[in-house]
Image (tube, helix red, strand yellow):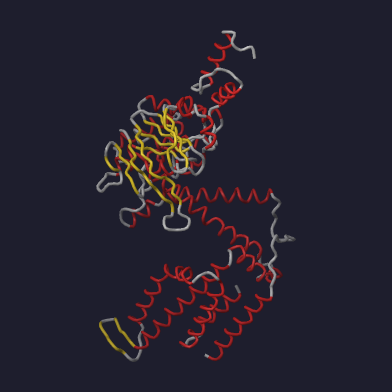
Amino acid sequence: MPIEVKNLKFTYMPGTPFAVDAVKDVSLTVEDGEFVGVIGRTGCGKSTLIQLMAGLIKPDAGQVLLNGADICGDGYDRKVLRKTVGVVFQYPEYQLFEETVERDVAFGPKKAGMSETEISKNVDMALSLVGFDPDDIREASPFDLSGGQKRKVAIAGVLATDPNILILDEPIAGLDPMARESFMELITQLNASGVTIIMISHNMDGLSDFASRIIAMDGGQVVMDGPPTQVFADVEKLAAMGLGVSEARQAAHMLAQRGWDIPNDIITVDALVDYVTAYLGKGGGNA
Amino acid sequence: MIILVALLVTIFVVDTFYAFAVIAIFLAAVTLASHVGVKTVLRGVRPLLFIIIFTFVLNVLFYTGDNILFEWGIIKISVEGIEKAVFIAIRLLLLVIATSLLTLTTSPMQITDGMESMFGPLKKIRVPVHEMAMMMSIAMRFIPTLIDETDRIMKAQTARGAEFDSGNIFKKAKGLIPLLVPLFVGAFKRADELALAMESRCYRGGEGRTRMKVLVMQKIDAGALAICGAMCVLLCIFL
């Protein structure tokens, strides 16, 4: 299900001296199966944009179309929206509330109106997806778990509705490198199975490796939109917006500044190593 | 602060329209002197307007007096009732304006600091004054944080399909569980962390603690206290 945004506007606290235009006239379309990385400095409106896309706040102007239907229109069935679009917030572990892990994960599917058998099947599926053995953890209290486990359970709670579109707001903040890696693996695995991913992240390395499209925002507007190789090519423009690039791209950029003839679409470590090996192999670099 | 308490007591004690007029004029003068702006002060009254009107109507309808103007079932409208209702409405209005003047001109920190020094003598009889003041300022400090947190959790649960604004009252109450549980868990956790942070910065209660900004009674404060005190006393005695 493609999700389309048309001339979206949103202002916080309109009509007061504190009014902030968080999103100004944004239009874009995300097609099925895309992996979109949203980048931008703090306060650029990216969180507001994804909350608008998830129908959690109402736009002041413009539309959000899910599969062609306006999600804020009269008579739109919100259940369809909630079932289709899953949202993982920053620090999702704070949304846990039930007595057992199983019941917490089942909350979403239950609200979506699934049958008992469907619910238990989805709960098991979601828990295994995030790397648990469902039978080990089913009866545990979510509050007895460690921070990392809590987060996994919370994410399972979102995945349990089997969403077609998964929206994530900096989901890997505060995770250790191992957990981060396994989380990115999970996301790419979901993406490969057909789930559309829209992810806000400051982790440029992760986005370079996995995203199929990058949207850079600044001042409530989309400033750059394209495949990662294209967006990360312009290191200076990103730096002017207070954004960095992946480490490999940064290294390549510095090599280019030192006179290497290196293309600007090298953004992953793999590509950089391949290029440098080939370059040295040719005898081009005596430096 | 003391002025406010005195004023509030006075507003409760006096029971003639003349006294109210004097207080109203006084409050108007204070409003002008405080540079807050009449509009801002009146805006503070707006949320309470409903309660004021409600009590007014209740008093008009149910206060039993001698001179009954109109009677229908249990509803009796009497001259005394109307008088009483107008009275209470004015009283409430003045109370609200007086308190909102305080909160608009004085920061919460100043209020708690003021309370601490005012109740200072109670320390002699082992009342934990400093601790209470500290608790109050911490509580006030965390109100906006909790509001933010509520908003965040509400959005997260809405995204999972929770509904906070539909169904009858029981459904609504039940619907609050997914919001309240994480909110309380978060609040307790934050309290724990705050205590740890305070202790790690060597906080150990009020004993021997000095202030960064010491509140000193100045001429203008003394003057304000004197004027207001005099007015309150006079009103209580003569009107």
Residue B109 rendering spot, x and y as whole percentages: 61, 62
Horizontal relation, residue B205 to residue A148: left or right:
right
Q: Quadrant of residue B89?
A: bottom left
Quarter the N terminus of chain B occupies = bottom right
Instruction: State the residue at coordinates (44%, 45%).
Output: A97
Residue found at the far top of this picture: A282
Q: Position of residue B185 (x, y in %)?
A: 51, 48
Q: Nearer the viewer, residue A269 or A104?
A: A269
Outermost residue to the front: A259
Q: Quadrant of residue A81?
A: top left
- Taking the view exactly as shown, the residue that stands out farthest to the right is B208
Q: Is residue A273 visible?
A: yes
Residue placed most toward the observer, A181 or B191: A181
Residue A162 is at least partly visible in this image: no
- Residue A262, placed above or below residue B80: above
Residue A226 in the image: above or below residue B198: above
